[in-house]
Amino acid sequence: QLQLQESGSGLLKPSQTLSLTCAVSGGSISGGGYSWSWIRQPPGRGLEWIGYIFHSGTTYYNPSLKTRVTLSVDRSKNQLSLRLSSVTAADTAVYYCVAGFCSLTSCPLQHWGQGTPVTVSS
Amino acid sequence: QSVLTQPPSVSGAPGQRVIISCTGSSSNIGAGYDVHWYQHVPGRAPRFLISDNNNRPSGVPDRFSGSKSGTSASLAITGLQTEDEGDYYCQSFDKSLFGWVFGGGTKLTVL
């Protein structure tokens, strides 16, 4: 069973860069055909898609975050990374790493990490 | 304001049936894109419930079922149990935004 575990900077000041990693176990990040996504949930609000990396390596980002976000895969460490620059209080959320078998227009999010909280405050 | 609209809350007694709606537009559900459903109990990882409108992954009880028609989709839960309490989200693709969108979530309370 695929397992995902997020970790990273939990408290940031405005304008800093958020950096999270997601360790993948129970399967190879390179095999299996999974695509890898990041989803977030601000306090008291619903889920928001941040972006994803196709199994081919192509990345797609939420247009509202595209200028600030970078997703990458480190195959040697079997982990994913998320970087979000110039954070504001609006980026305060629980961030989830998720895996699924995706096409360009359909991505059932099958395996979720536990999530890691990030707070942006001066 | 979420692209997909869900009722904020639904409730039902143990053993009853509830339906959670997810209303979109011609840019997403109405364009034929698949709808997926998730259950989220606060403090725990979200759980994948329904794939591609009406397919249950292994391990999901057959009390959960999905459907889609026109610009809307629905999640039905029969034989309500207390452990079904939580927040439920629908998800689809939006061609105008060119990305995935979620509903705002529906809180299910089992009375």
Image: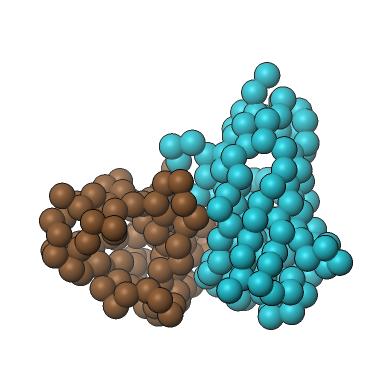
Q: Is residue B16 left or right of residue A78?
A: left
- Residue B72 locus on image (x, y percent): 34, 65
Name the residue at 36% across, 51% down. Answer: B87
Q: Is residue A72 visible?
A: yes
Name the residue at 70% across, 56% down. Answer: A22
- Residue B71 locus on image (x, y percent): 36, 66
The answer to which of A99 and B76 lies nearer the viewer is A99
Q: Is residue A66 left or right of residue B59?
A: right
Query: Chain in brown?
Result: B
Quarter of the image for the N terminus of chain A: give it.
bottom right
Quarter of the image for the C terminus of chain A: give it.
top right
Query: Chain in cyan?
Result: A
Residue extending farthest to the top is A122
- Residue B84 locus on image (x, y percent): 29, 59
Name the residue at 29% across, 58% down. Answer: B83
- Residue A99 locus on image (x, y percent): 62, 67
The answer to which of B10 and B79 lies nearer the viewer is B79
